[in-house]
């Protein structure tokens, strides 16, 4: 859920989830989302069209044409039918992607090595501090040795944090693919009533 909030926040235009096509159709001219508009709302010619939400904002008008909602629905259903026609192949592709995304063995191996490095450097740093406190020695040499340990620690820590972030960032995609693989065999054609409910 947090990943979806972050994705929506990162969009350059306002997100809307009030319609199944909302925030899905992007203007090829300015990059804004298309939104539904009602034409002739109080007459027998009433119809819903979709056009760029930024079409009339600013000095330059977007050149993209409006789309009739019935055309959008027809194209969606055609694309969905095409997907259903290759259901098994798509499911196999999803499983392959899921395997690729869930294989974190290389990251885990590198993380293990980095955590061992961090433990070793922490121990060396503590020993260095203790030796300096217990016996007289050149403070210049001590500072040089201490700074080298700190730099080594920070380098390992930064790499470990980056790998952990890389691993965590793939988790929402892995979960989405897992849900798709689980539910895809049960996917059926949307009913006309569902499609009509969007308008």
Image (cartoon, grey):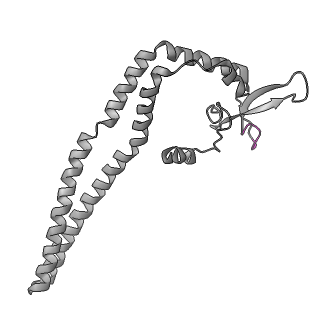
| On-image quarter of the C terminus | top right
Residue 86, above or below 118: above
Horizontal and vertical percent position of residue 54: 72, 39
Q: Residue farthest to the right?
A: 43
Looking at the image, residue 56 sits to the left or right of residue 94; the answer is right
> Which residue appears at 69% of the width and 21% of the height?
193
Q: Residue farthest to the bottom?
A: 136
Judge by depth and name the residue closer to the eye, 62 or 157: 157
Looking at the image, residue 185 sits to the left or right of residue 189; the answer is left
Look at the image and say whether residue 20 sits in the magenta stretch.
Answer: no
Looking at the image, residue 54 sits to the left or right of residue 117; the answer is right
> Which residue appears at 11% of the width and 83% of the height?
138
Write down the quadrant of residue 194 in the picture.
top right
Write down the quadrant of residue 133 in the picture.
bottom left
Look at the image and say whether residue 55 sits in the magenta stretch.
Answer: yes
Write down the quadrant of residue 132 in the picture.
bottom left
> Which residue appears at 74% of the width and 39% of the height?
60
Judge by depth and name the residue closer to the eye, 61 or 197: 197
Residue 29, above or below 112: above
Judge by depth and name the residue closer to the eye, 104 or 139: 104
Magenta span main SS = loop
Residue 125, above or below 105: below
The magenta segment is: 54-59
Horizontal and vertical percent position of residue 5: 54, 47
Horizontal and vertical percent position of residue 197: 71, 27
């Amino acid at each position: 859920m947090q990943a979806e909030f972050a994705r929506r926040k990162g969009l350059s235009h306002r997100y809307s989830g009030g319609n199944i096509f909302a925030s899905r159709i992007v203007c090829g001219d300015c990059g804004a989302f298309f939104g539904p508009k009602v034409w002739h709302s109080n007459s027998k010619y009433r119809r819903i069209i979709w056009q760029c939400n930024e079409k009339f904002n600013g000095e330059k008008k977007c050149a993209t044409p409006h789309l009739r909602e019935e055309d959008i629905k027809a194209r969606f259903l055609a694309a969905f039918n095409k997907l259903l026609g290759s259901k098994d192949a798509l499911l196999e592709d999803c499983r392959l992607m899921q395997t690729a995304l869930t294989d974190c063995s290389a990251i885990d191996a590198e993380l293990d090595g980095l955590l061992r490095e961090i433990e070793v450097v922490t121990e060396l740093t503590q020993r260095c501090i203790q030796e300096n406190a217990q016996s007289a020695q050149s403070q210049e040499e001590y500072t040089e040795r201490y700074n080298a340990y700190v730099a080594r620690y920070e380098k390992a820590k930064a790499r470990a944090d980056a790998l952990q972030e890389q691993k965590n960032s793939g988790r929402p995609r892995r979960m989405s693919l897992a849900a798709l693989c689980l539910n895809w065999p049960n996917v059926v054609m949307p009913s006309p009533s569902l499609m009509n409910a969007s308008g």
